[in-house]
Amino acid sequence: MKTAETIKNNVEQELRWEPSVCATKIGVSVNNGVVELDGHVGSLYEKWAAERAALRVVDVTSVASEIIVDLPFESERTDEEIASAAANHLNWNSQVPDTIKVSVSNGWITLQGTAEWQFQKEEAARAVRSLRGVKAVSNEVTLKPTVNTIDIKIKIEDALKRDSQIESKDITVETSGTLVTLRGRVHSWREHDDAEHAAFSAPGVGSVSNLLTVSS
């Protein structure tokens, strides 16, 4: 595993490489592979992009984000305006089911309701994250799959083996109804997320408990 200083430098370089992030406004510190980000940004999307950029760096095991969203005056909007814009974006997005609803309080969007697939839940959050005036998004949408769940385990294991980015031999898949639990070890946070994405892509998966540890 690289030294904390090396990881810190790599994260800082990745932040500078990410065009949607103003890296000079973000501080980086590292302790045992855990990256802490702090500073002030002008939008929720920039905060999210900075966190994702840090997670892409090799040997980063997790990110603790203390980044604060300070909206510029011209970006301030009332909760009613944000709620109206968010509802329109969800309604216009063909990947988001009409069972997902939105509420807003002090610039904080909460998504609630149900979806059949994980990608629908993720798409709902993506659709509203970049709206002007949004300070945070809480995604409380629950998954309610409607298909047979008998062979979930086999399908997920096969999907992991097909993915060239995942070392599937170190991953164990456990299922209980629509719940999938992933255990084992991966080499990067991207591999960690790819495995979770593969599990969520199997028909019938309602939730995934990702207990994979990241180590080099």
Image (cartoon, rainbow, N blue to C red):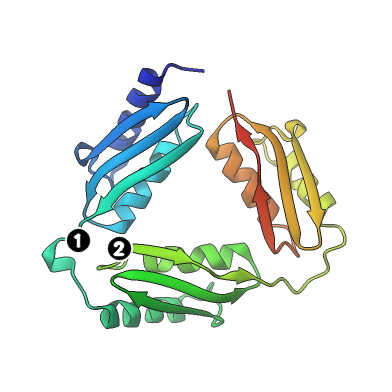
What residue is pinned by disc 1? 71
4 left or right, relative to 204: left
- Name the secondary structure under disc 1: loop
What residue type is disc 1 on?
Answer: Leu
Q: Position of residue 111 (x, y in %)?
A: 47, 72
Residue topped by disc 2: 135
In screen coordinates, is 20 left or right of 149? left
Q: Residue at x 34, y 80 (%)?
A: 83
In this rendering, the answer to whether 165 lies above or below 149 is above
User: For residue 186, what is the image quadrant?
Assistant: top right
Which residue appears at 81% of the width and 57% of the height?
176
Residue 203 percent location from the top left of the image: 75, 63
Q: Nearer the viewer, residue 141 or 188?
A: 141
Q: Which mark is residue 103?
A: none
Q: Position of residue 99 (x, y in %)?
A: 56, 81
Q: Residue at x 44, y 77 (%)?
A: 90
Of pointers 2 and 1, the one earlier in the residue sequence: 1
**Image label count:** 2
99 shown above or below 207 = below
Task: Give the residue furthest to the right.
Answer: 150
Q: Residues within 10 Å of mark 2 (few under 14, many from 20)?
A: many
Residue 105 against residue 36 in the figure, above or below: below
Q: Are marks 2 and 1 in contact (CB under 8 Å)?
A: yes
Q: CA distance from mark 2 to mark 1?
A: 8 Å
Which residue does the image show at 76% across and 65% down from the upper left? 204
Expressed as whole percent of the image width and height from the top left, the position of residue 46 reads 30, 51
Report the side of 110 relative to 201 (left or right): left
Q: Amino acid at mark 2?
A: Lys
In the displayed structure, 119 sits above or below 115; it is above
For label 1, count other residues whose C-alpha is less than 10 Å away and answer few (under 14), some (14-19) or many (20+).
Answer: some
Q: Secondary structure at mark 2?
A: loop
Relative depth, front residue between 30 and 13: 30
